[in-house]
Image (tube, coloured by chain):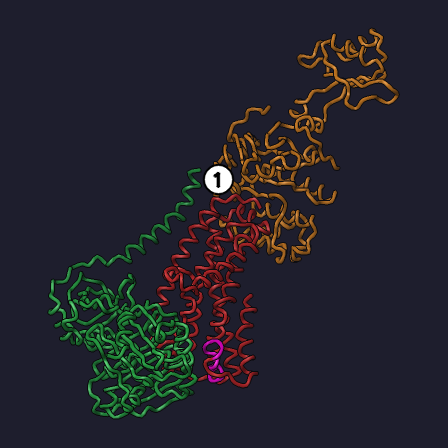
Chain colours: A green, B red, C orange
Amino acid sequence: MTRTWLRWMPAAVVPAVIAAGVLSGSLPASAGDPLPEKTPRQVLLMVAQHGEKSLSGTLEQTSQMGLPELPKAGAGSPETAWLELLTGPHTARVYLDGPEKARVQIMDRMAERNAVRNGDELWFYNSKDNTAAHAQLPADADGRHEARPGTATTPEELADKLLAKLDASTEVTVGTDVQVAGRSAYNLLLTPTSDATLVDSVAIAVDGETGLPLGVEVKARGQAEPAFSVAYTSLTLEAPDAAIFNFTPPPGATVEEIPVPDHKAAAALPPSDAAAAKAGKRPTVTGTGWASVLEFPAGAVALPGKAQGGAPDPATANPLRPGTSDPEGTRTVAAALLEQAAVAVPGGRLVSTSLVNVLILNDGRVLAGSVPLERLQAAATPR
Amino acid sequence: MLCALAAIPILIAVAVRLSSSVPPGRGPAFLDRITQNGLFVGVTAMLVSVPLFLPLTVGVVAGDTVAGEAGLGTLRYLLVAPAGRVRLLLVKYAGAVAFAVAAPLVVALVGAGIGAALFPVGPVTLLSGDSIGAAEALQRLLLIAAYLAVSLMGLSAIGLFMSTLTDVPVGAMASTVVLSVVSQVLDALPQLEWLHPWLFSHYWLDFADLLRQPIAWESFLTNALLQGGYVAVFGALAYGRFVTKDVLS
Amino acid sequence: MTAAVPATELSIETTGLSKRFGHQLAVDGVDLAVPKGSVFGFLGPNGSGKTTTIRLMLGLAVPTGGSVRLLGEDMPRQLHGVLPRVGALVEGPAFYPFLSGAANLHRFDAADPHVPAATRKARVRSALERVGLTHAADKKVRAYSLGMKQRLGIANALLAPRDLLILDEPTNGLDPQGTREVRSLVRSLAADGATVFVSSHLLAEVEQICTHAAIMSAGRLVAQGTLEELRQGGQARIRVVTPDAGTAAEVLSRLGLSAATSPGGAAPGGGGVLYAPLPGAAGNGEAAPEAVVAALVAAGVRVRGFAIEQVSLEDRFVALTGEGFDVVQ
C-alpha cells in the first residue's frame, strides 16, 4: 500500500510545486534595494527631467468602468473605437526612437491597429479591413509627438497631462515603491481633496532610475479594482530596430490620404470637433479641478435619431480611423451601446461609469464630468 | 484522421475559388486575403481548425492511447512482454505528441500547397501591415504550426490521463474532447476572467502574434509555460493512475 | 498435501495470495507451489479466481495481501527481470485486428526491451511455425478464426526461450485436432525443461497432460499436488446394491463402515444402493471387501451387486468444489 501512495506522490507534488512557483512569482520580486526616499516634488522633477526618448515596450491597459464589453478587434466604426478602448483589456506595443520616430501597435485578436510616425510621414493601418491612411506632417510640426493620435496613451503622456493639472485641488504623496515591468518605481499618488468627484485616486508609477512614467492607475470611489490602468509589462530602454519605423502600405490595402489641416487648428481640436468649434458650439466648463463639469450645448454632439450622444474625450476620439466615409452607418454601434448603457433619469438619460457620468438632457444638451449625477443635474439647471 | 484534417484547407481553398469574392472583414479572419495570396489558405485553415477539429482529432488520438489497448485486450500482453508501465506511458504520450505535431503541420502544408496551386503567391501582408517574402511567410506558417502543436500538448496530456481511467476508448476520447470544449466555453465567459489565464485553451488563438512584425513571442512563451504545467500535472496524474492500476481488461 | 520441495525448486510460489474487488474476495489466501519442470494444471470452475490469480502472478494486478514469487524472484518488485523469462497467455488472445499475425507478434516482441531486435524476424517465424500458423502469417488477424487467434496467442508466449509458460485456457476454441496439437506442444515444451502452468476448466485436458494440479473453488485453493496424490486424497469406496438396504446398513456399521444411501435412489431391478468407504483404508475397520460381502450374506441381505469404485479426479473435483463440472471431451 505504501508503494501505491508513493506512486501518487508526483501527482500531489507537481501541482504543489506549480502553485508554489506561481505564488512566489506573483509576489513582488523581493525588491532588492529600496529606492532612496524622495519627496513628491523630487519625483515630479524626475518625471519632468527624464530624457528617455528611445524605448520599446509592451503596454497593458485594463478598464473596469462598468461599461458593457464591446467586441474587440477594432470592429465597427471609428466612433466605437474609443469606447472599445475604454472597455475590456488591451495590449499594445510601443516603440519610440527620439521625438521623430514612433510606432504603436494595438494587438487585437487576429488583428492589429498600427500608428507609425517616421519623420514627417504618418501612417495608420488597420489589418481588420486592410485599410491604411497616410498623412504628411507639415515640416514645422517639430517634436510634438503627442500629436500622434493617442489611442495608445503612453504612461508618459498621461502622466504629463495629469501633472500639468496639479493644483491646490490635489494632494500629492509618494507611496511605497512598486514593481512595474520588473523595475522598481516610485508610486506618485494624487488624491483629490474634493469630495465632489468620482475619482478616488490616481497613482503614477515613476521609474526609480530614469524618471520615466511606467504606469498610471485611476481608482474610482467605492471600487477596489482600478477603474482604469495602463502600465508597461515589459520595457527596454534601447533604440528599437530602425526598420520598425519604415512603413509602406501593403499591396491591396485601401490607402487614404488625410489632408493635414492648418497646424494651429489641428493643435487646438481634432478634426471631428473642428466643425463644432467653428459653429460656436464649444463646451462650457463649470466647477473647478476634479469636479469640473463640461456642458455641450444642444446640437454640439450629433445625435442621429433619439439615441445619441457620448462625449468622447478629444484626446482619445477617433484614433486610427480618420476620414470615415459613412458616419450614419458607423454610428449605429455607438448608438446601440448607448441604448444599452443609458438609464432614464429625471430630465434626460444618464450614462454612468465608475469614473465619468454623462447626462443627456431631453433638450439636447450634454453634460459630462467625473462627478455624481446630482452635480450634473445641478449644473444643468440655469443659474 | 490526418486526411480529414487535410481536407479542411482543400475545402476552404476550393470554396473561395468557386465563390466570386469575399467581402473584406467577413467570415473568419484572413479569409478575404486568400484570393490575393494562396499562402493564407494555410493560415485560415489553421484558424478554422483550432476551436474544434484539432482538439477533436488530438482528443481521439490521446484518448485512445491506453484505453484503446485496454479495450482490445492487448494492454495485458504489452505489460507482460514486459513493456514496463512507465515506458509504455511515455511511448504512448510520445505517439500522441507526434500526432499533435503532425496535425497542424498537415493543415498548414496542405493549405499552403493547395493555395499555391489555386491562387497567386506573393509577398504576405502581416497584421502589422508590413510585408514579407513568400519564403519567410512559409517560415511563419511553420511557426504557427509549431505554436499549435505546443498548444495541443496540454490537451494530449489530459487525454492520456483520461485514457488511463477507463477501458473504453470512446469514453476517454469523448471526455477529452468535451473538456476542450468546456475550456473554450469557460474562456468565453467574462465572469470567469480570473480563471482564463489558467485554461489550457486560453492562448490557442494567440498564434496571430506570430503574424506581427516584429513577432510577439510573449504569447508563445506564456503558452508553452502553461502547456508545460498541464503536461506536468496530468502526466503525474496519468503516472499515478497507470502505475497503480489493476489491468483487468 | 504438498510434498515439501525446496523453495528454489519452485517456479511459482504464492503465499497467502489475496485479491479483493470491493466487497468480494476474488482470491482468498492462495498458497500455490508449482515445482520446476512440472506441467501444472490449474483447475477450477468458471469464476473461481483462476484468471485473477494469474493476473496477480504476472503483476497485472496488485495483490490485496500475500506475495508471489516467480522463478524464485519477488513479484512485482523484480517484474522486469522475471517477465522476459515468462511466456503468457492471459484470458484469451488479444490482437490488433488491423495488423497481420506476424505484425502483431512483431509489435509485442518490440514491447519487450530485453530481447534483441536483430533476431526478431526469425523468432517470430519460428513461433508461428511452432503453432502451425506459417501459412496465415500475413493474413490480417481480423480474418482469423477463434482457433487461429488462440494459436497466435500461444505463439506470442513462445517468442523467446522461456523458463515458465503460463497458459490460461490454451485449448479454448480449438477443434479436437488443434487441442491435440496444443497438448503435444505443451509436452514438448516441458520436455525442453520449461515449467508449464496451464489453467483450465476442462478436467480431461489436465488429466492428459499434467503432472501436477491444483483446484480452485470460490477463490480458495482446495487441493494441490501430483495427479496421483490428488486421486489418493479421495478414497476408493464400496458400492452395494440390495433391496434390504436397512439391514445392510446395520451390518456395515457393525463392521465399522458408515454407509450412506445413494442420493440416486433405487437401482435397476428394485432395491437401494449403498456406498461405504473402502474397508482396509486407514480408520475404516479391518474387514477386507470380500469379508464384507460374506457378512452381508450371512445376515440375510440379498446382495445383488457389489463393487469397489476408484474415485475419479472428476468425483474428487465435484466433492471439493461442490459444483457441477464441464466434462466435454
On whether residue B37 falls in the magenta region, the answer is: yes
Q: Chain of mark 1?
A: C
Q: Residue at x 55, y 54 (%)?
A: B171
Identified by mark 1, the residue type is Pro
What is the magenta range?
B26-38
On whether residue C271 falls in the magenta region, the answer is: no
- When asked about the image quadrant of residue A313, the answer is bottom left
Residue C107 can be seen, yes or no: no
Image-based side of A61 in relation to C320, left or right = left
Residue C18 can be seen, yes or no: yes
Image-based side of B140 in relation to B71, left or right = left
Tell me where residue B183 appears, x and y as whole percent: 45, 61
Q: Label 1 belongs to which residue?
A: C76
Tell me where residue B5 appears, x and y as whole percent: 54, 69
Q: Residue at x 53, y 77 (%)?
A: B12
Q: Main secondary structure of the magenta part?
A: loop
Image-based side of B222 in relation to A184, left or right = right
Element on which disc 1 rests: loop
- Quarter containing the N terminus of chain A: top left
Q: Nearer the viewer, residue A352 or C65?
A: A352
Q: Nearer the viewer, residue C278 or A110?
A: A110
Residue ranking furthest to the front: A383
Neighbour class for label 1 at 10 Å: few (<14), some, many (≥20)? Answer: many
- Quarter containing the C terminus of chain A: bottom left
Q: Nearer the viewer, residue B117 or C100?
A: B117
Tell me where residue B228 appears, x and y as whole percent: 39, 59
Q: Residue at x 25, y 84 (%)?
A: A147
Q: Nearer the viewer, residue A58 or B41?
A: A58
Q: Residue at x 77, y 13 (%)?
A: C289
Tell me where residue C42 appears, x and y as whole percent: 63, 34
